Image (tube, helix red, strand yellow):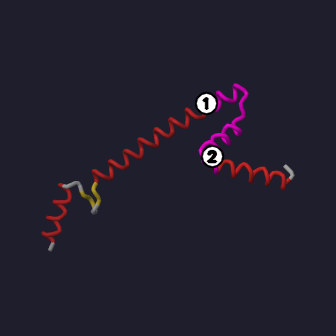
């Protein structure tokens, strides 16, 4: 039995399998995620820079963020949201 287990382990090692995990695939996934995380960090730095630039021009960062959120919505959803928001503001005395 021991010889069979050793033979399976040797076969796994040749195929880059450790503990039933394909090490090449695992490392590929990890490296791709790390690369994207680094790219995300770089993009976030750029976005912060753009917000700083906007502030220097006298633009309001929270207002810009709200416009960005609204632009992501479908027009019908956005219109419904804006009507509801106005109703809520009136009801709350805002």
| Lateral position of residue 75 relative to residue 9, left or right | right
| Vertical position of residue 66 compared to residue 91: above or below | above
Residue 57 at x, y percent in the picture: 70, 25
- Quarter of the figure with residue 9: bottom left
Query: Is disc 2 placed on a helix, strand or loop?
Result: helix
Residue drawn at 68 percent across, 48 percent down = 79
Q: Decide which of tag 1 and tag 2 comes sooner along the chain.
A: 1
Q: Residues within 10 Å of mark 1 (few under 14, many from 20)?
A: few
Prevailing SS of the magenta stretch? helix
Residue drawn at 26 percent across, 59 percent down = 18
Of 65 and 3, nearer the camera is 65
Q: Which mark is residue 36?
A: none
Residue that sits furthest to the right in the current view:
93
Residue 75 at x, y percent in the picture: 63, 46
Q: Residues within 10 Å of mark 2 (few under 14, many from 20)?
A: few
| Lateral position of residue 63 relative to residue 68, left or right | right
Determine contact: label 1, label 2, CB under 8 Å.
no
| Vertical position of residue 31 compared to residue 51: above or below | below
| Quadrant where the image shows the N terminus | bottom left
Residue 23 at x, y percent in the picture: 28, 53
Q: Is residue 53 inside the magenta stretch?
A: yes
Q: Which residues are magenta?
A: 51-76
Residue position marked by numbered label 2 in the rendering: 75
| Lateral position of residue 40 relative to residue 6, left or right | right
Of 88 and 35, nearer the camera is 88
Residue position marked by numbered label 1 in the rendering: 50
| Lateral position of residue 46 relative to residue 35, left or right | right
| Vertical position of residue 18 compared to residue 66: above or below | below
Residue drawn at 69 percent across, 26 percent down = 56
């Amino acid at each position: 039995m021991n010889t069979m287990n050793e033979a399976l382990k040797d076969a796994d090692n040749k195929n880059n399998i450790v503990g039933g995990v394909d090490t090449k695939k695992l490392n590929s996934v990890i490296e791709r995620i790390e690369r994207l995380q680094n790219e995300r960090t770089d993009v976030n730095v750029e976005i912060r820079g753009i917000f700083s630039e906007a502030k220097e021009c006298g633009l309001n960062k929270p207002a810009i963020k709200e416009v960005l959120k609204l632009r992501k919505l479908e027009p019908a959803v956005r219109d419904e949201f804006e009507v509801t928001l106005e109703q809520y503001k009136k009801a709350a005395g805002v």
